[in-house]
Amino acid sequence: MTAGDSFGRLDDDDYPAYTMGRAAEMLGTTQAFLRAIGDARLITPLRSAGGHRRYSRYQLRIAARARELVDQGTPIEAACRIIILEDQLEEAQRINAEYRRTASLRTAGT
């Protein structure tokens, strides 16, 4: 991999650029919190060649949402489930919008 390839990944939301320590620091939380949401299968960090957890920006946004809910008093397992359900709802709404758009194009074309 060249330096140019590495720089190109800086814009990739799924690139696992952050160590556990850095991720916890950025979120203002503990490494134990990141382990807990990993154990709850909210996020699955990639592993470096040495076995260390690495997080992407996308995963950090999810972790930040979990922290927000936990800070409001929601148990961590419930917070993880809420986020999973929110994500499923968003995906279902996106699919429904696509179906509606396709259906309206078909009726407009007849």
Image (tube, rainbow, N blue to C red):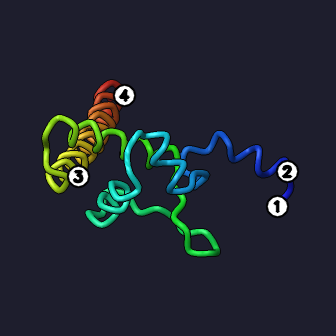
Image quarter in which the N terminus is found: bottom right
Label 2, residues with CA under 10 Å away: few <14, some 14-19, many ≥20: few
Identify residue type, mark 2. Answer: Ala
Which is nearer the N-term, disc 3 or disc 4? 3
Identify residue type, mark 4. Answer: Gly
Label 3, residues with CA under 10 Å away: few <14, some 14-19, many ≥20: many
Disc 1 designates what residue? 1
Q: Quadrant of residue 51?
A: bottom right
Q: Residue at x 14, y 50 (%)?
A: 75
Disc 3 designates what residue? 80
Q: Residue at x 36, y 28 (%)?
A: 109
Identify residue type, mark 3. Answer: Cys
Residue 40 placement (x, y as % from top left)? 26, 63
Foreground label between 1 and 4: 1
Which is nearer the N-term, disc 3 or disc 1? 1
Label 4, residues with CA under 10 Å away: few <14, some 14-19, many ≥20: few
Disc 2 designates what residue? 3
Q: CA distance from mark 2 to mark 3?
A: 37 Å
What element does badge 2 sit on?
Answer: helix
What element does badge 4 sit on?
Answer: loop
Note whether 46 is above or below 9 in the view shown.
Answer: below
Q: CA distance from mark 2 to mark 1?
A: 7 Å
Which is nearer the N-term, disc 2 or disc 3? 2
Q: CA distance from mark 3 to mark 4?
A: 44 Å
Q: CA distance from mark 1 to mark 4?
A: 49 Å
Q: Residue at x 69, y 47 (%)?
A: 9
Residue 88 placement (x, y as % from top left)? 24, 48
Numbered label attached to residue 109:
4
Q: CA distance from mark 3 to mark 1?
A: 35 Å
Note whether 39 is above or below 70 in the view shown.
Answer: below
